[in-house]
Amino acid sequence: MCKRAGVHGQLVRGCGDFGVGGGEEVISKRYIEHQTKEDQLDENKNIFYWTGHPFVDAGLSSLLLLSGKERPEDIKDEDVNNAIKFAAKIYSEKTWSANYLHGMIFPNSGILMANPGIKGIISKAIKNILKKEMSISTESLDILKEMLIKNFDEMLAKDVIEYLKQLKDTRYKTLLSEEDIRDIGSEIIKQKFVNEAIKRKIERELYRLYEDIKNQKKEYVEISEGTCVICGRYPPYHKVPTYMSSFPLLGSGKKANYFHSGNLRGADICVHCLFLVQFMPLASYKIGRVLIIQGYPYELNLELSKEAIQDVRIHRSASNARNFKRTENFLFRKIIEITQKVVGGYNYWRRASISLYYFISNNQGQVIDIINIPNPSLIFVAFASSYDPQGWKNLVSTGWRKKLSTDEEFLNFEREKTNEVYTKLLHNESVLSHFINLKNRDANTKWELLEFYCKEVLGMDEKALELIKNVGDRIVETLDTLEENKLTRRLRELENATKLYQFEEFFVNLEKLRQRMKIERPLMSFDEFSSLLVNYGENLDISWRTVKNLLLFRIYEKLHDKLSKISEKEETNEGGDEE
Ligand SMILES: [Zn+2]
């Protein structure tokens, strides 16, 4: 999916199911009530809220995780100050500024100074001024000082002037050549004090937004200019026009059609949301593009961002998600780990939801894939991995069509390769065929896992499953009495059934066999026969093929040892019992 205009409307609606980011009217009313009662008591209380928008909430998660807090209302002035300092320090580093922030999230950001040319501007100004006199003269230094104070700050002016004076005393005592000026320009921007100046500038920009949040709160009485399209609580902020440089996936402001409001001032986004989104990169994972994982309930949102923040703290670079190259593989790994930690195990996921936002927003283009993880798949992955870890691994391995013998091998595949089972789970497609290994006539997991999958994901009812299991056991009972060559011939009838009548034929033949063998109890009653074949035969969701796969699973599970001995013999006796 590739969308530009209107994508934010969709992002917010994504959480509508949970009653967040809802109607403007309700929230405005709530805001005004809240404004009059609580805010008078505590100015800093409730400056920040969860909004339901993945990017803004990712920023809020960063702020909370950096502060070691869980609830937005607990964020204090001091926490925000620390977060601003931390972000400014990280963002001023080149790996962030040019490659990540400018290259993928906020191209040419004036707030985060994410502009690969920012140092170039400093060196160009220095060079131009030096060229006038072709020497480091007092007059040039004065002009330079004034310019740097105006565009950056006094400290940078002081640092640059001192550095130039020292150059004059040592290397460039007299006139400068063109080449000298070039060298001076490139030497200066490599100095640490330039980085420090950029860091201070980012800090100042973020503080300015934060101050505006606090000031707005005092002045704000009623909503007259409309409300923020993201949180629906505050008026749009137009001191800085909100374009793609300060909020991902918007237009550049040159063309109105990237904004659904057609508003040339940019998107109608409030200063709260604009401020929070500046912290979003800290909670993101860099997997080719930028990955934001949104979770609900909000504790889950925090949990899913935790690793990103930890990585930034330790490595000072954006998290590479443990080198995973596939977003869904990384996500399923995280789900398994979270399940081990939470109270309630797999049941935790019954009230949870997860969406992935996988995007890139730069001057060359903007693209986003939104992946909502089907809830039954979440529950199944959580159950499978904890109930039958080996079975789960076998099942997943079939998604690479590989038998992976060591954990390390498994992990390497998990990091690198697209997996068919994961992909099917993401798209709500059946993975039933992955439970059995037709070639080796083996079951990949325990029956209970298959049962759980059928109930939770395919929505089969318990009675039907019980019936299929019993019929499967009766088939096993019959087959087990047969001579080896007859056994495989019967089994092949079932394995090769591709049409419903062939499937039915298998049962009729087996029933005849039971009569010949004088087994008293019939394979199935008439009722059972009709419910198994007729009911499911016509049902498109749970077709007779589902039943066939379940029966094969049961047969392989019970008779695997015998069947593999037979196939070994068949292989050594070339053509021996083959039909
Ligand atoms: Zn807002």
Image: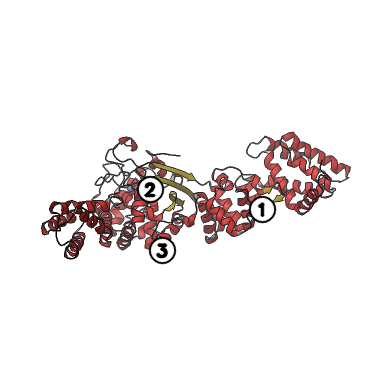
Q: Can I make out residue 193 in this image?
A: yes
Q: CA distance from mark 3 to mark 2?
A: 22 Å
Q: CA distance from mark 1 to mark 2?
A: 42 Å
SS for dot 2: helix
Amino acid on which the number 2 mark rests in the picture: Met
Which part of the image, by quadrant, shows the C terminus? Answer: top right
**Pointers 1 and 2 in contact (C-beta within 8 Å):** no
Percent x, y of residue 347: 56, 55
**Mark 3 — residue?**
314
Contact (Cβ within 8 Å) of mark 3 with mark 2:
no
Q: Nearer the viewer, residue 432 or 380?
A: 432
Q: Position of residue 234 (x, y in %)?
A: 30, 47
The type of residue carrying mark 1 is Thr
Res 13 seen here: no
Residue under the point 66% across and 53% down: 445
Tally the marks.
Answer: 3
Residue that carries the numbered disc 2 in the rendered image: 104
Taking the spot 32% from the left edge, 55% from the top edge, the residue there is: 47
